[in-house]
Amino acid sequence: MTDTDIFVYCPCTSPFIKSETISQCINQFLTAPGYDCLATVSNVKEFLWLEGKPINYDPVNAPNSQDLPNVVALNFGVTVVRKEDLIKNSNIIGKNPQFVITSDIEAIDIDTPLDFYIAEQLYKKTEIEKKGLLE
């Protein structure tokens, strides 16, 4: 086991996480007591269904998508957790997580060939052509 009190997990599959976001997450975790981990998340404003039933809206009175409830999805760009909580929970996400919302670009997680293609195109536009989309 690694000899540390706190783990900061920033996988290479989230290539657009900014160093400022990583620093913010670490500082926020260290200064906000009462949470057993901190994780980056993305807002989800979509009409969601599970097992044939809507889970975040009433189809009879469907709101505009921007008026859907604030649901977040873990994007695993940055996760901060104490070693003792990681061991106790057997999971990088604890029982009482604190969330930091990231931008859509920082939330990109490369899991599929399509994700890789999108990330590659963003990189070309932002880094090679200096289009400034990542700011």
Image (tube, rainbow, N blue to C red):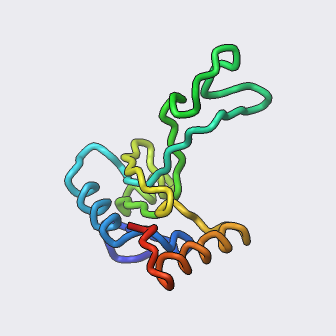
Q: Residue furthest bottom?
A: 128
Relative depth, front residue between 123 and 107? 123
**Count of numbered marks:** 0
Q: x, y percentage for residue 116?
A: 66, 73
Q: Quadrant of the N terminus?
A: bottom left
Relative depth, front residue between 33 and 70? 70
| Res 122 → quadrant | bottom right
Q: Residue furthest top?
A: 60
Q: x, y percentage for residue 28?
A: 26, 55
- Residue at left offset 61%, top offset 77%: 120
Residue 69 visible to an observer of this rendering: yes
| Res 133 → quadrant | bottom left
Question: Is 130 above or below relative to 41?
Answer: below
| Residue 37 falls left or right of residue 90 | left
Question: Is 112 above or below relative to 73?
Answer: below
Q: x, y percentage for residue 44?
A: 55, 42
- Residue at left offset 29%, top offset 63%: 26
- Residue at left offset 38%, top offset 70%: 18
- Residue at left offset 71%, top offset 32%: 49
| Residue 93 falls left or right of residue 61 | left
Q: Residue furthest right?
A: 52
Residue 76 visible to an observer of this rendering: no
Relative depth, front residue between 1 and 94? 94
Q: x, y percentage for residue 41?
A: 47, 51
Q: Quadrant of the C terminus?
A: bottom left
| Residue 117 falls left or right of residue 89 | right
Relative depth, front residue between 30 and 116? 116
| Res 25 → quadrant | bottom left
